Amino acid sequence: MKVTLDSACGLLRSNDNFIILTHRAPDGDTLGSAYALMRVLSSLGKTAYVKNCDPVPKKYAFLSDGAPGVPAGFEPGFIIAVDVAETTMLGALSGEYGDKVDLCIDHHISNSDYAGSTYVDADAAAAAEIIFEISKKLGAALDRETAMRIYTAIVTDTGSFKFSNTTPRTLNIAAELIAFGFDFNAIQRELFDMKTPEKLCLEKLVLETLSLYDDGQIAMIHVTDEMLRRSGTTSEDMDGLAQIPRNIEGVRVGVTMNQSGRDCWRISMRSGDVNVSEVCKNHGGGGHPRAAGCEVAGELPAAREEILSTLRRFMNEKDA
Ligand SMILES: [Mn+2]
């Protein structure tokens, strides 16, 4: 059931012994929001723990630093999910908790309303904007550590305030947060600017594969298992590669082909004006209009031709 922010806060006030769940393949928003909310609730004298269905990625480890794990035998009184749009996003914990979430705090318009109570603010750039508002409404005093976690979550989901989801409210909250004096420049460097030498080596190998088609309207790159091996990277390092072809001037659709097994390719498409979700649906995939994916079987040249011909068909239809 959808509820207001006030009733969500009422639930947090009147309950105790919280478990806060994050989504699978956790990002800075779900983790920053969860650990910030844990600290907010603890500051009000309540007991709260975060439970993740996947391990915290190394680059986000500072968000869970110092937080105790759920003690053995702990009996939760109230279960919260943050930034979790549907129960499948609870990954390995969806069986155990999928139908037991008491309150979901989220900013995905697609939220499936699976929890007992759901508060969704689709105008919030990050779930953490809602956590910030909750902390105000509950009268919790923020400290530097909590402020840093909320800030990190917002920076993650707005791509450092670059994405179009950034609003005046986002920046006002960020302004209030950096006044706490944490090192926001270090967060920026660690999350966005720094690369491992291995990752840079992978990018170099991948750039060698760049091909432009149709007067530079389509750009394609590919990543093979061999490239991961040679650069000493793993599939975790493929983060952000899909942006490379899309960010070339004049390109309407950027395509990244990731090897997935011997003769299978996971395709990521990014576009400016072509509905790539429809293109990918043609190959059994889907996604958002400007960012979608699918899988194609076959050796690289054949798989590439297959994708190109579907893309051309859609782009010609659009231009006709
Ligand atoms: Mn989010």
Image (cartoon, rainbow, N blue to C red):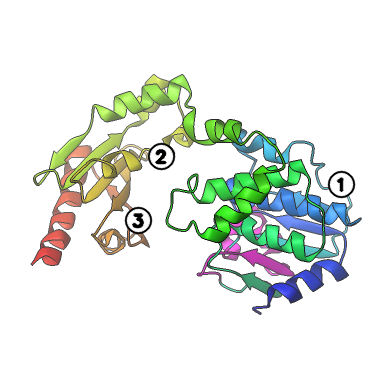
Q: Say what amino acid the circle numbered 1 marks.
A: Pro
Indicate yes or no whether the magenta region holds residue 261: no
Which residue position holds label 2? 240
Quadrant the C terminus occupies: bottom left
Read off the magenta span.
Answer: 85-111
Q: Please, is residue 249 above or below residue 40 in the view?
A: above
Q: Which amino acid does label 2 sit on?
A: Gly
Q: Which of the marked residues, 2 or 1, is nearer the chain's N terminus?
A: 1
**174, above or below 191, in the image:** below
Query: In the image, which disc is placed on residue 292?
Result: 3
* Contact flag, marks 2 and 1 (Cβ < 8 Å): no
Q: What element carries label 3?
A: strand
For label 3, count other residues whose C-alpha is less than 10 Å away and answer few (under 14), some (14-19) or many (20+). many
- Mark nearest the camera among 3 and 2 is 2
Left or right: 165 with respect to 302? right
Percent x, y for residue 200?
40, 24
Identified by mark 3, the residue type is Ala
Name the foreground residue: 314 vs 35.
35
Q: What residue sits right under mark 1 in the picture? A: 71
Sequence-wise, the earlier of marks 1 and 3 is: 1
Q: Which is closer to the viewer, label 1 or label 3?
A: 3
Residue under the image location 62 percent in, 49 percent down: 175
Of callouts 3 and 2, which one flags the residue occurring earlier in the amino acid sequence? 2
The quarter holding residue 272 reads bottom left
Q: Are marks 3 and 2 in contact (CB under 8 Å)?
A: no
Q: In this view, does 6 lie above or below 309?
A: below
How far is mark 1 from mark 3, CA to CA? 40 Å
Q: In the image, residue 46 lies at what x, y percent?
A: 89, 57
